[in-house]
Image: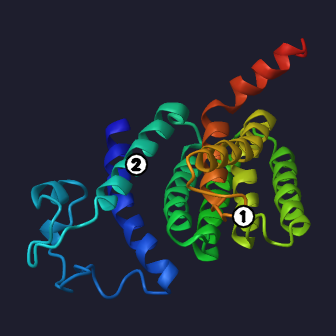
Amino acid sequence: MLTGLGLLGLVVGSFLNVVIHRVPEGLSLWRPGSACPACAHPVRAYDNVPVLSWLLLRGRCRDCREPISPRYPAVELATAALFVAVGLEFGRDGYLAAALALAAGGVALFVIDLDRHRLPFAVTGVTGVLVAIALGLDALGGSTAPPLLALASVGLWIAVYAGVWLATAGRGMGLGDVALAPVLGLALGWLGWGPTLVGLLGGFVVGAAVGVVLMTVGRAGRRTRVPHGPFMLAGAAVGMFFGQPLWSGYLGLFGIV
């Protein structure tokens, strides 16, 4: 299963490269086919194998020999690694499909926000729909996850992020962050309060830590706008994989559990 998930991740990652490049530009995901950005020559099918083609071509276009960004295989490998990690964590659990959908959408949103400082509603919306469908199927399959807890988690994430957006008049974060909040709240809330609270707090902790480092090394100032989406997604990943033991450990400090 893990091998299959890894291979699936490579294929999905290849598609995510198209999403990352075309969605912010408002271009079709299907037409025209992939082409070299330098010489516009269409990419041959045998040159479009995830990671392997980039290695065989030594990171250059077959026709014009211009360099091909290493970000393409990096996205493919990152997606494959996430899919395998999700498989290790959730195995054949009904939550697996929702976690895979969130991982795929998260990779695309992470890179787009770093590049463009925006989270396209189209990508967030599709990710949210896929997660909701997967969780619905999980519920029909007999999942013991309480739906009301997941809805409460959605409300909490919306309240926090919408509150920050209103309090800062949109300067602290964008509407794209607010739109992503309920998707993460739903996915983590399905796992329980531990994952959702750790994931919610984790995004702000990671963001603050990175901000301090950037200011310390002179890469950012107090007014520098840093995209918050990657921090949200990083926090959500921590919540998904480590949220419950971290939350239980925290409560244990006070003798609650």
- Position above or below: 83 against 158: above
Outermost residue on the top side: it is 255
Q: Nearer the viewer, residue 135 or 53?
A: 53
Q: Nearer the viewer, residue 198 or 244?
A: 198
Measured from the top left, where is residue 182 in percent x and y? 76, 59
Q: Nearer the viewer, residue 178 or 97?
A: 178
Corner quadrant of residue 90: top right
Give the CA distance from mark 1 to mark 2.
Answer: 31 Å
Is disc 2 surrounded by few (<14), some (14 to 19) or many (20+) residues within 10 Å? some
Is disc 1 surrounded by few (<14), some (14 to 19) or many (20+) residues within 10 Å? few
Q: Secondary structure at mark 2?
A: helix
Residue 105 appears left or right of 169: left
* Residue drawn where x is 23% and y is 54% of the image: 51
* Residue drawn where x is 64% and y is 51% of the image: 231
Q: Amino acid at mark 1?
A: Arg
Give the foreground label among 1 and 2.
1
Q: Amino acid at mark 2?
A: Ala
Query: First in sequence: mark 1 or mark 2?
Result: 2
Question: Which of the labelled discs sits on residue 223, or is there none?
Answer: 1
Question: Which of the labelled discs sits on residue 78, or is there none?
Answer: 2
Q: Secondary structure at mark 1?
A: loop
